[in-house]
Amino acid sequence: MSDLISLARKVTLKYKGDGVFLRSIISAQTGNCPEDCSFCSQSAHFDTEVEAHPLMAAEKILGAAKHAEKMGAMDFCIVISAKGPTPRIFNKVLEAVDLLREETTLKIGCSLGDLKEEQAFELADHGVWRYNHNVETCRSHFPNICTTHSYDDRAKTAYLVKETGMNLCCGGILGMGESVRQRVEFAFELKDMDPTWVPINFLNPRPGTPFEKFEMVSPFEAVKTISIFRLILPDKIIMTAGGREVTLRDLQAMGLVAGANAMILGNYLTTPGRTPEEDLRMLDDLEMPIRKDIVN
Ligand code: SF4
């Protein structure tokens, strides 16, 4: 294990240099999603504890963005629960993007589900620099996690994002019943898709979802998997995301030494994260600089 981590660290330093990118997200529209992703507490198919709310006003999104900026985030992502944005929601998101670009120095990301071609180019025109669109798991496992859309439906928008010139941010969730072999398969599929950012989430089983009784990935296994992803995806920004705290537990710092070089600061979409202060102290203790340079 220590050899694997040490190798992953060397690969990170060689391909990406030292330091960690900090990002922040907001669930700007939560719940009532018509899709049936079995891990997701925002699906309208399941009876979960999530408090659904419609799209927040742009001013409210701005308040959260300013807080993230103060805490040191370089990038702020507006996320909505949907298969894809309706024209009305899309226009409101654009208004929020414009406001955030005027009032903050943050790079703005979006995660709005499947996009039409014209929507993707419009986001890029409004200065959205990164689009998050996870394919969630490998192709062979996808039918076990969702029946209302396919892996290829997701992949289509991921490829469209690349055409626009926005940074593609595409990863998934580990611990959804996939085998170790399928995790490796997933990493190689992501390599083919060639995103700039690869978010690795760990399933934090949500009450009321079909996956509520799944066992969580152990901290040790999570660290090993991060290292293996780093070896397969040496030149990507690998970001530990949802489920990081509850999965890695006391091995938080090890995740960064093992190959991750970005993380989400603060809360996730439907679950709370550690406080930003705790994460900033961890980076300080590790003597890892916070990076804000532009990546393409
Ligand atoms: S993961 Fe996204 S598309 Fe799937 S149910 Fe949740 S919000 Fe909807």
Image (cartoon, rainbow, N blue to C red):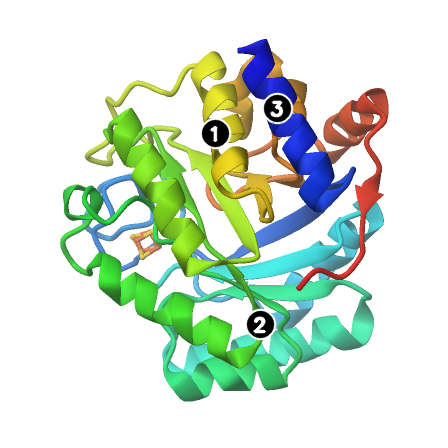
Q: Residue at x 53, y 86 (%)?
A: 122
Number of other residues with Cα within 10 Å of mark 3, as a class: few under 14, some 14 to 19, many 20 or more: some
Please tell me whether mark 1 or mark 3 is closer to you in this view.
3
> What x and y, as percent, mark residue 140?
18, 45
The residue singled out by tag 2 in the image is 166
Residue nearest the viewer, comparing 50 with 82: 82
Quarter of the image with the C terminus in it: bottom right
Question: Mark on residue 228?
Answer: 1
Tell me: residue 188, above or below residue 28.
above
Q: Residue at x 67, y 21 (%)?
A: 253
The residue singled out by tag 3 in the image is 7
Tell me: residue 131, above or below residue 277.
below
Disc 2 residue type (three-letter): Met
> What x and y, as percent, mark residue 261?
66, 38
Q: Secondary structure at mark 1?
A: helix
Answer yes or no: is residue 256 visible.
no
Disc 1 residue type (three-letter): Ile
Tell me: residue 81, above or below residue 203.
below
